[in-house]
Amino acid sequence: MVPNGLIVQDTSKHLVSEDCPYKGIGAYPSWPLDNQDVYSTDEPSRVLTDTAHRLWFDYQWEDEERDIVSYPIAAAPDIEFTIAYVKRCKELGMEPRVLVVESDRELPQMDYHAFRLLTADATFIGFDYLSSQDLFSAIYDDFFRHDLAEFALLRTMLNEYGVFPNDKFFQKYITLREEALERGSEVETGLDLIEMGLSVITPETLTTTLSKLSGLTIA
């Protein structure tokens, strides 16, 4: 899998019910400084958001094999940028969670050595099935929002985060979902879905990793 980069979330706000076992990407808002209320009133948030879109997010290409438009994952491969983003989130009273993302999507792409350092002490959450830009989770939608009968036997394979703990179980889900789509079942379709491996790191890991990469002590 390709080491894509980092995603910052605000865990003080929930996109699913707080008692829902699903804690994948779709559980919390990603890139919270892009929230309209924050973006329109806070200049540092606006600068950070615009930078992320200009450098990494705002690209697209035609995926002829799947007959859809594809996009890079909304992840930042730059550690220094992510440190600044987390800092601003904290200053605004948010509770940031930092995820390290890997997938089969080639863009964006993080330096492999940086990725290895970041994930050395990370908590691996598991595999989620997500749209590239708005990070919509098909797993949450299929298992928790709608609880579709097609996937009932797979539900016991989900881990404590409500995602799949290994690629073997995950691929079974992908196969069943594709079969359900062919039958015309009521699953979300037309999405640029990507298989993503997710790990959680502490904000402190960002600064220690940057220090190791640069050979400097970060204050």
Image (cartoon, grey):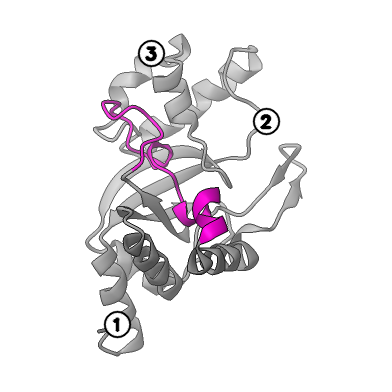
Number of numbered discs overlaid on the protein picture: 3
Q: How far apart are the alpha carbons under marks 1 and 2?
A: 42 Å
User: Does the magenta segment cover residue 70?
Assistant: no
Q: Secondary structure at mark 3?
A: helix
**Which amino acid, by three-letter code, is at mark 1?**
Ser
The disc, 2 or 3, on the residue closer to the chain's N-terminal end is 3
Q: How far apart are the alpha carbons under marks 2 and 3?
A: 23 Å
Q: Secondary structure at mark 2?
A: loop
Q: How far apart are the alpha carbons under marks 1 and 3?
A: 46 Å
Q: Which mark is residue 190?
A: 2
Q: Badge 1 is on which residue?
A: 211
Q: Badge 3 is on which residue?
A: 152
The disc, 1 or 3, on the residue closer to the chain's N-terminal end is 3
**Which amino acid, by three-letter code, is at mark 3?**
Ala
For the question of whether residue 59 can be seen, the reply is yes
Where residue 119 appears, as percent x and y from the top left, is: 30, 61
**Which amino acid, by three-letter code, is at mark 2?**
Gly
For the question of whether residue 77 can be seen, the reply is no
Residue at the top extreme of this rendering: 149
Residue span colored magenta: 13-41
Nearer to us in this view, 46 or 6: 46
Vertical placement of 173 versus 67: above or below?
A: above
